[in-house]
Image (cartoon, rainbow, N blue to C red):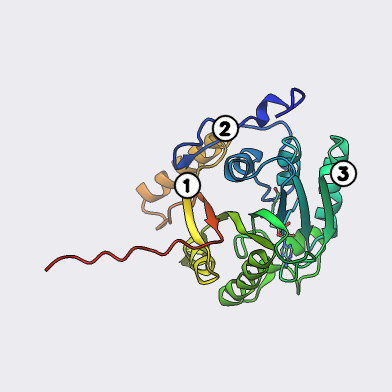
Amino acid sequence: MSSSTPSHLEMPHSVGTTIWQFGPSEYRDVSYHGCTQPQVVLAGVLRFVKPGDLVVDPMCGSGTAAIALAYHGIRTVNLDISANAIQIAKARAANRGLTRYASFSLADARRLPLASSTASFAFFHPPYYDMVRYAAENGSSPEKDLSMCASYDEFLESIRHVIAEISRVLLPSGGCCLQIGDRLSRGEYLPVGHDLYNLFRLEGFSLFEENVKLPPCQALDAIGRSKRWRDRQNFLGRQQLRNLIQHDYVMIFMKSRTPLRTWVFAP
Ligand SMILES: C[S@@+](CC[C@H](N)C(=O)[O-])C[C@H]1O[C@@H](n2cnc3c(N)ncnc32)[C@H](O)[C@@H]1O
């Protein structure tokens, strides 16, 4: 890390436990709906790469991963289906003088414009199914935007294609950090994290680590207020409320699979 690296870009202290919660970061562009916290990228990717390595972010949004990694000399290829997102990400990198480390292009993550076996690692932060309708917010093409899929099955099928592409562009020694959250949709709890885990395994990846990421510390007041309101509604018998989903998963996958050991119990 260079001496000019902002102190908040140092590796977060919570690495080393499987419960992650990070504080504010001065350059998290919260105006981009669903942007990640830079510390997630540092904790989830930086441990596995070295300066000069190439990381691919196939759904880069506002480019948080590109910026967090550029401060550490890591090159990134950043793609998104939204022209608006690409413009925001480019501007953020340019404002910090980090463009030599990062390229930004419009692309559908199901067909990555990258040669096979070129990237050391991937940071993959897809839509949480239909939680944020990115095409509606960004004016991108609804047919290509995975948050606009007509059904959950169609969403999973599309994500399967993206994972296959991530696998193709990774070096055999490569890995991928997935950030994802579950979703309540039409009364059903959709275990998006579990389902994406299965898709990674089917594609030949093995799980290296799973972490539960809590909302940013500064969001807890709002959550507390919401929880008090919900508890009161429950107490008054007004509504049968569901628990708020407050956690994300951050899973680290490795491309080369270590075979799972099958335990055989002696009779
Ligand atoms: C959760 S956001 C990523 C946020 C990003 N990590 C950040 O910090 O700003 C998911 C992104 O996926 C993009 N997206 C949706 N469908 C896509 C597709 N088929 N190919 C590429 N990007 C897509 C959306 O435009 C959105 O920016």
Q: What's the residue type where badge 1 is placed? A: Val
Q: CA distance from mark 3 to mark 1?
A: 31 Å
Residue 238 in the image: above or below residue 227? below
Q: Seen in the image, is 257 located left or right of residue 128? A: left
Q: In front: 101, or 34? A: 101
Q: Nearer the viewer, mark 2 or mark 1?
A: 2
Question: What element does badge 3 sit on?
Answer: helix
Residue 136 in the image: above or below residue 143? above
Task: Determine which of the numbered discs, if any, sits on residue 91 in the image.
Answer: 3
Quadrant occupied by the C terminus: bottom left
Mark 1, residue position: 212
Mark 2, residue position: 12
Q: Residue furthest left?
A: 267
Q: What's the residue type where badge 2 is placed? A: Pro
Q: Are marks 2 and 3 in contact (CB under 8 Å)?
A: no
* Res 110 visible: yes
Quadrant occupied by the N terminus: top right
